[in-house]
Image (spheres, rainbow, N blue to C red):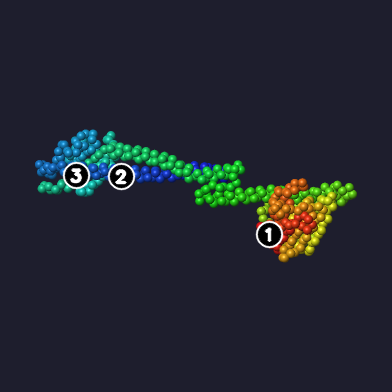
């Protein structure tokens, strides 16, 4: 696990460069080996061809000598090829009979000692016209030699005679040539590796610049200087940046949901807390009555907390086809609101039919609770609530006898945190919560003037709606 993690954490540029360098070294090493072998074979072939030409020159310089009644050969002491005339030249010429008797040797070969083993190697093949080229191992204090043997049949009036022409050359010139070539070859290959690695590093730096740009943009997002990845990225990483932007968007939406939920939770808990305060301040209340009221409101607050947390955890809520009777919820809310606003002695006008709300009871309580709280807060003592089915839709209307909401401001009051009247305590999110619930149920919200003199807020929903939103 640690080994794999260390590989993953390594530099991408370093990993790519190391891999490319390894491949490059192996490839050029193979190329160098192939070229070196080809040059060596070519050099050996050149030696073979040169020795064969020398053998032809020796044959051409040979003269028949038959004074002794047998065919013999004579070659001049000085040959046209200077290498055969000077000792230490590294080029030697000899002529043997197939039986191993030496007929002639060049002036350069006067100090050349060939043992029986060497002669056996040189005369192993005596088929006329068949050239043999090979290497003679080091012997008698002398380094290895290249040799070429050329058996011939000398036709004469005295009869045919067989001779073997042998040309030898020191290994040193060939070895020096190959060594010089190898030094040059591997020097250039090493230089090529260095240049190509540097070029590859530059190409990788240029190719990975978009990733550096991505890193810069992510740093800017981390520091709050930008919200999303907005740079121009290559096609290969567009999918990654798109996914990251979706992730960032979802994270911001989730964070906004948490913030909204906390604000909604605080707003929703105000009513139960106000009721608890009002109950505690009643001097005529017995301990049992206060305890019962506390238990009721604590249960209500527990439900509110659970409801808001449930909304925060999930970005969607399933709106089932089950419905909630409106009348019991209205009665419960009106009773609670009376306790909160008992000093205002509010008159509630309820016109609630047997209609059902097509959704969760907690959403209905949140919606009506905020509408009633708003009406009581800004009204002048009279609130009307109407619940009925109108043209195939469940309609809830709450109105008051306050100063109303100017038509130019009716869209503003539905925005979170905006309040038209700063004289009343609050956070300005009550109607925003209502708007969010209406939107989740694909309902409609309309603000008009009330016949009571204040504002009239109407929300309506389809009788049945099932969808995940």
Query: Residue 119 sits in which quadrant?
Result: top left
Residue that badge 2 annotates: 41
Secondary structure type for disc 3: helix
x and y percentages locating residue 415 in the rendered image: 69, 51
Question: Residue placed at 89% from the left, 49% from the top?
Answer: 284
x and y percentages locating residue 330 in the rendered image: 79, 58
Residue 179's place in the image compared with 126, above or below, is: above
Query: Residue 80 sits in which quadrant?
Result: top left
Secondary structure type for disc 1: loop
In the rendered view of the protein, which quadrant contains the N terminus?
Answer: top right
Q: Nearer the viewer, mark 3 or mark 1?
A: 1
Q: Nearer the viewer, residue 331 or 255?
A: 331
Q: Nearer the viewer, mark 1 or mark 2?
A: 1
Cα separation, mark 2 vs mark 3, equals: 23 Å
Residue that badge 1 annotates: 442
Q: For residue 103, say whether it is visible.
A: yes
Residue that badge 3 annotates: 56
Q: Nearer the viewer, residue 388 or 212?
A: 388
Question: Residue placed at 44% from the left, 40% from the top?
Answer: 198
Q: Residue furthest right?
A: 284
Q: Are marks 3 and 1 in contact (CB under 8 Å)?
A: no
Going from N to C along the chain, the mark reached first, 2 or 3, is: 2
Cα separation, mark 1 vs mark 2, equals: 88 Å
Q: For residue 309, say whether it is visible.
A: no
Q: Which mark is residue 382?
A: none
Secondary structure type for disc 2: helix
Q: How many marks?
A: 3
């Amino acid at each position: 696990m640690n080994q794999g993690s260390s590989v993953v954490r390594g530099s991408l540029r370093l990993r790519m460069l190391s891999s490319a360098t390894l491949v490059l070294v192996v490839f050029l090493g193979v190329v160098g080996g192939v070229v070196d072998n080809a040059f060596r074979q070519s050099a050996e072939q050149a030696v073979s061809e040169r020795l064969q030409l020398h053998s032809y020159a020796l044959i051409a310089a040979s003269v028949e000598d038959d004074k002794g009644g047998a065919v013999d050969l004579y070659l001049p002491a000085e040959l046209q090829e200077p290498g055969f005339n000077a000792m230490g030249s590294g080029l030697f010429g000899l002529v043997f009979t197939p039986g191993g008797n030496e007929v002639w040797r060049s002036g350069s070969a006067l100090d050349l000692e060939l043992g029986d083993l060497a002669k056996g190697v040189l005369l192993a093949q005596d088929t006329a016209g068949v050239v043999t080229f090979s290497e003679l191992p080091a012997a008698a204090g002398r380094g290895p030699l290249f040799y070429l043997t050329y058996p011939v049949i000398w036709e004469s009036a005295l009869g045919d005679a067989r001779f073997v022409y042998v040309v030898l050359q020191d290994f040193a010139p060939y070895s020096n040539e190959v060594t010089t070539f190898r030094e040059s070859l591997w020097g250039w290959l090493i230089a090529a590796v260095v240049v190509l690695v540097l070029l590859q590093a530059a190409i990788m730096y240029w190719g990975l610049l978009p990733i550096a740009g991505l890193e810069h943009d992510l740093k800017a997002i981390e520091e709050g200087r930008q919200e999303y990845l907005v740079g121009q990225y290559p096609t290969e990483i567009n999918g990654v940046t798109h996914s990251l932007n979706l992730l960032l968007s979802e994270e911001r939406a989730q964070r906004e949901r948490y913030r909204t939920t906390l604000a909604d939770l605080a707003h929703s808990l105000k009513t139960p807390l106000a009721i608890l305060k009002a109950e505690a301040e009643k001097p005529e209340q017995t301990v049992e009555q206060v305890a019962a009221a506390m238990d009721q409101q604590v249960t209500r607050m527990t439900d509110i907390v659970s409801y808001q947390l449930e909304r925060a955890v999930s970005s969607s809520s399933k709106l089932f086809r089950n419905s909630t009777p409106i009348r019991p919820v209205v009665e419960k809310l009106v009773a609670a609101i009376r306790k909160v606003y008992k000093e205002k002695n509010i008159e509630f006008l309820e016109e609630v039919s047997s209609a059902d709300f097509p959704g969760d009871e907690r959403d209905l309580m949140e919606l009506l609770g905020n509408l009633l709280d708003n009406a009581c807060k800004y009204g002048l003592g009279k609130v009307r609530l109407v619940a009925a089915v109108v043209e195939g839709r469940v309609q809830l209307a709450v109105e008051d006898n306050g100063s109303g909401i100017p038509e130019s401001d009716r869209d503003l009051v539905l925005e979170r945190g905006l309040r038209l009247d700063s004289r009343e305590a609050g956070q300005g999110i009550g109607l925003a919560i209502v708007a969010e619930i209406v939107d989740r149920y694909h309902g409609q919200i309309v603000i008009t003037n009330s016949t009571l003199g204040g504002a009239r807020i109407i929300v309506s929903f389809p009788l049945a709606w099932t969808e995940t939103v």
